[in-house]
Amino acid sequence: MNEKIKSGLVKLLRDFVKENEIELDKDVVLDENVRLIGTSSVFDSMELVQFIVEVESLLDEEFEIEIELTSEKAMSRRNSPFISINTLTEYIVDES
């Protein structure tokens, strides 16, 4: 299940970047390790919020996982689940 979620999130990420015409540095690879937040991230704060909404929708529709990624529990973690697709996948699997 972990790998299915991860590959679904990577596909969603690539589609989201393309659809929203997000400009990336030429050396950025959109894979499970790309930074979603922080100084070298692919998103600004509004794009991250939009992406999170799409992730929740994908999880519900494709995997029947209902999760609120913007909950206090997710936001107050010492290590953010939004660092990369890998950390986001780990959080989703742990919480579902």
Image: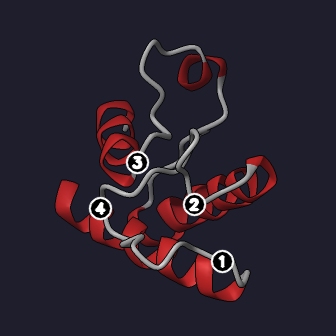
Q: Position of residue 31 (x, y in %)?
A: 32, 68
Mark 2 lies on residue: 42
Q: Position of residue 89 (x, y in %)?
A: 33, 48
Left or right, 43 with respect to 45, comes to: left
Decide which of tag 1 and tag 2 comes sooner along the chain: 1
Q: Residue at x 37, y 35 (%)?
A: 91
Mark 4 lies on residue: 6
- Helix, strand or loop at label 1? It is loop
Checking the image for residue 84, the label placed there is 3
- Amino acid on which the number 2 mark rests in the picture: Val
Circle 1 or circle 3, nearest the eye? 1
* Distance in Å between CA atoms under marks 1 and 2: 8 Å
Q: Residue at x 59, y 55 (%)?
A: 56
- Helix, strand or loop at label 3? It is loop
Mark 1 lies on residue: 23
Graded by Cα atoms within 10 Å as few (under 14), some (14 to 19) or many (20 or more), the crowding at tag 1 reads few
* Distance in Å between CA atoms under marks 3 and 4: 10 Å
- Helix, strand or loop at label 4? It is helix
Cβ–Cβ below 8 Å for labels 1 and 3? no
